[in-house]
Amino acid sequence: MPTVLEAGSWYDSEGCAMPQLVFEFWSQEVDPIVEAIRRVLGSCPTKNVAAGHSLQCEPTQQGLDWAAHQFSRGELTSFRLHPQNSGIRYALLIGPDFGGDKRPGYMGTIEYTRADYHHIWSGLLEVDGLRLVCLGYEEGVEFTGEQLTAETFPWDDHFLVIGAVRSRVGDWIQKHGPNYVASVDGPKGRSEV
């Protein structure tokens, strides 16, 4: 089975191959998205950018708690965090009204540039309230508000590495995508699914 670095990479300024992986996760409420981002980033310092309905991004010293409050008041449509020393390029929280679209909930995105994705994947699956978690290459997996169930999720999306959707009883239904590759930090000798 190929590893992430063998399957698809971009190259940093020193010519080192780096994967470009995109975690996406969805919830009907903002708090699980905030919790997921908090768990993944830990205590890593970040530079943050917020956008309201004008989509004009403004730097802010405010953090995730402030952003969650602003989302609940309908004053923010996106909040992006850029970790200062991490394999994470950014974490993004977008609201139901982002870009003038009306979505059925909140979306989180984390762009990751290392081949050891399993610790992030398993951490996201532990967040109560998340209904969908997926990992894809490049720009991530394309799905709509009508594709949030195991029956409708685009399991055949070309960029999908692995996906998980909550069943009606609350457990995860996980499947490998067409672009599945094992994480270099995954369980040895067995699949994540």
Image (cartoon, rainbow, N blue to C red):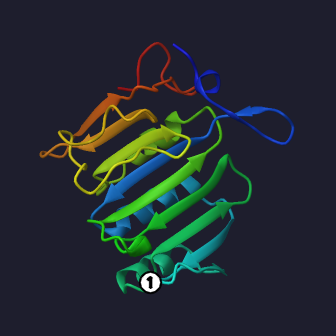
Q: Nearer the viewer, residue 64 or 51?
A: 51
How crowded is the residue under tag 1: few (<14 C-alpha within 10 Å), some, or many (20+)?
some
Report which residue position mark 1 lands on.
Answer: 70
Q: Is residue 105 above or below residue 155?
A: below
The residue at the far left in this view is 169
Which residue is at 39% across, 52% downward?
25
Give the x, y percent position of residue 18.
70, 35
Which residue is at 56% across, 16% downward?
2
Which residue is at 40% across, 33% downward?
162
Give the x, y percent position of residue 60.
64, 81
Q: Viewed as shown, does residue 188 lie left or right of 13?
A: left
Q: Nearer the viewer, residue 132 or 85?
A: 132
Q: Quarter of the image containing the C terminus?
A: top left
Total number of numbered discs in the rendering? 1
Which residue is at 53% across, 52% downward?
110
Q: Viewed as shown, does residue 12 lie left or right of 131?
A: right
Q: Quadrant of residue 77?
A: bottom left
Give the x, y percent position of residue 92.
52, 62
Give the x, y percent position of residue 101.
35, 70
Q: Is residue 161 above or below residue 82?
A: above
Q: Viewed as shown, does residue 11 lie left or right of 154?
A: right
Per the image, label 1 sits on a secondary structure element best described as: helix
User: Three-letter amino acid code at disc 1?
Assistant: Gln
Q: Viewed as shown, does residue 123 lie left or right of 55?
A: left
